[in-house]
Amino acid sequence: MKKIEAIIRKSRFDEVKKALHETEVNFFTYWDVTGVGNEKQGHVYRGVSYSTSDIQRRKISLVVSDHNVDSTVETILRAAHTGSVGDGKIFVTPVEEAYRIRTKEKGTDSLS
């Protein structure tokens, strides 16, 4: 099993959520996060300069079986992509075990 964490633009969240549901990834957790990115320049809007060093994003976290990792990552990449700086990052880490509290199932059985 692998844990996939994706930090994406908030504006692309609905597309990512829809794409994940279409690939039958129906359970994930998400929350709003703020981070500091690589973009160092500020922007000017109506003559007022503002900093873009603090970036508002949405973080998605899900656990999938090993054979679903590549397709899930590809789905997020496709749906979150705009081609501009700040599209986000995806991290994949191993998960040793998972348990469903209600039924006491463990391993990949607990994921469905």
Image (cartoon, grey):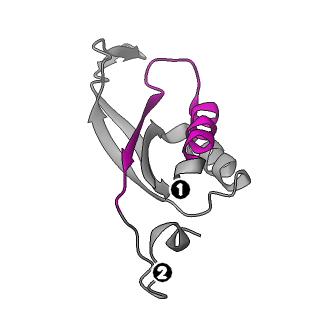
Left-right relation of 74 to 91: right
The quadrant holding residue 83 is: top right
Q: Is residue 69 above or below residue 27?
A: above
Which is nearer the eye, 9 or 41? 9
Decide: marks 1, 2 in contact (CB < 8 A)? no
Which is nearer the eye, 52 or 38? 38
Give the residue at x 65% y 43%. 15
Which is nearer the eye, 10 or 75? 75
Mark 1: secondary structure:
loop
Q: Is residue 38 above or below residue 28?
A: above
Residue lying furthest right in this view? Answer: 22
Residue type, label 1: Ser
Q: Could you tell me residue 103's position as x and y percent?
A: 49, 88
Q: Is residue 72 magenta?
A: yes
Q: Could you tell me residue 112's position as x and y percent?
A: 59, 70
Please tell me which of labels 1 and 2 falls first in the chain: 1
Disc 2 crowd rating (10 Å Cα; few below 14, some 14-19, many 20+) is few
The quadrant holding residue 95 is: bottom left
Which is nearer the eye, 43 or 17? 17
Give the residue at x 48% y 27%. 87
Give the residue at x 53% y 56%. 65
Judging by the rendered image, the residue that carries numbered circle 2 is 105
Q: Which residues are magenta?
A: 68-96
Q: Is residue 3 magenta?
A: no
- Which numbered circle lies on residue 65? 1
Residue type, label 2: Glu
Q: Is residue 99 above or below residue 50?
A: below
